[in-house]
Image (cartoon, rainbow, N blue to C red):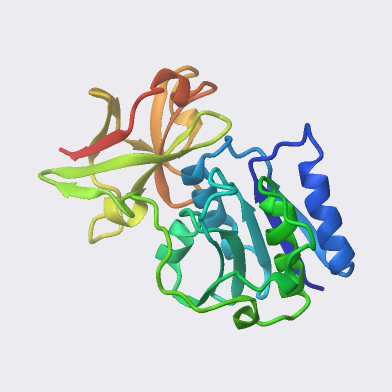
């Protein structure tokens, strides 16, 4: 049974998600629709790109990921259809594929142009419903990617460093995502922090000039309210507050330093 996932910044207060689902089920009633999240911060492309990469390989081959975070809707920005690791994405050409493209080799990338696969009437402000949802449904039904438009090798990539920068005595990374608990996910990868023996280096993590200690294993390693750094489920270094919010404490922080001492 084909699967279409939905990843948007629409929220659930309004009817927008329901309209996407109605369009998909009308075209492809046999499809299973999975909500990834509709709570992406409005217009936050970096957040959506990270979430898309995190869930990519968790779904079966031929899954269609429909990602609609689209601050440029109605402009001349394009809509693209990409194939990576046997799965598909339909999204605006605004950088949403950044992290997926960095993790997997592109197997296909086309500009969505063939109006036969759109709804008959196209709103200038709701391309998620009128273009992306129907394209995702037709793709799930077996239409081949090349049928939707011309092949392209040029598409938007967000200016986010893929991994932390090595410095004298450590690494300098940046915050790429914050979750609902206020944990700040960085681009410092677990593999960068391990020595040739596979163990973490005896180092300290520095956030906004404050030393918060070595890399911990779990929240319970520090008292409630204390800062900590740990390797999260994404294999990236995260900054957190035990039973608190690192995002609130360091709202303007963009860089995180790890020093080996």
Q: Is residue 114 above or below residue 212?
A: below
Horizontal and vertical percent for residue 3?
75, 66
Front residue of 256 and 218: 256
Q: Is residue 166 left or right of residue 254?
A: left
Residue in the picture at 41% in, 23% down: 251
Quadrant housing residue 185: top left
Residue in the picture at 78% in, 62% down: 119
Front residue of 142 and 132: 132
Horizontal and vertical percent for residue 68?
63, 51
Residue at the far left: name it. 168
Q: Is residue 110 left or right of residue 212?
A: right
- Quarter of the C terminus within the rendering: top left
- Quarter of the N terminus within the rendering: bottom right
Horizontal and vertical percent for residue 118?
73, 65
Front residue of 192 and 108: 108
Q: How many numbered marks appear?
A: 0
Residue in the picture at 18% in, 50% down: 166
Horizontal and vertical percent for residue 30?
88, 70
């Amino acid at each position: 049974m084909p699967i279409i996932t939905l990843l948007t910044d629409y929220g659930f207060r309004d009817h927008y998600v329901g309209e996407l689902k109605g369009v998909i089920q009308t075209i492809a009633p046999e499809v299973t629709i999975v909500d990834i999240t509709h709570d992406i911060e409005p217009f936050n492309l970096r957040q959506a790109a990270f979430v898309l990469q995190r869930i990519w390989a968790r779904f079966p081959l031929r899954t269609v990921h429909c990602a609609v975070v689209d601050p440029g809707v109605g402009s001349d920005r394009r809509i693209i259809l990409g194939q990576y690791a046997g799965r598909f994405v339909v999204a605006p050409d605004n950088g949403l594929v950044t992290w997926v493209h960095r993790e997997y080799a592109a197997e296909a990338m086309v500009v969505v142009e063939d109006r036969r696969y759109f709804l008959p009437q196209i709103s200038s402000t709701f391309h998620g419903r009128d273009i992306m949802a129907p394209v995702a449904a037709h793709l799930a039904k077996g239409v081949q990617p090349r049928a939707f438009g011309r092949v392209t090798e040029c598409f938007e990539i967000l200016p986010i460093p893929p991994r932390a920068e090595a410095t004298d005595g450590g690494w300098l990374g940046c915050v790429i995502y914050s979750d609902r608990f206020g944990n700040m996910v960085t681009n410092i990868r677990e593999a960068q922090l391990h020595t040739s023996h596979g163990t973490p280096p005896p180092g300290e993590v520095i956030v906004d000039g404050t030393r918060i200690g070595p890399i911990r294993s779990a929240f319970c390693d520090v008292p409630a309210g204390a800062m900590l750094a740990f390797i999260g489920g994404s294999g990236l270094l995260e900054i957190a507050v035990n039973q608190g919010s690192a995002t609130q404490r360091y709202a303007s922080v963009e860089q995180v330093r790890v020093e080996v001492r």
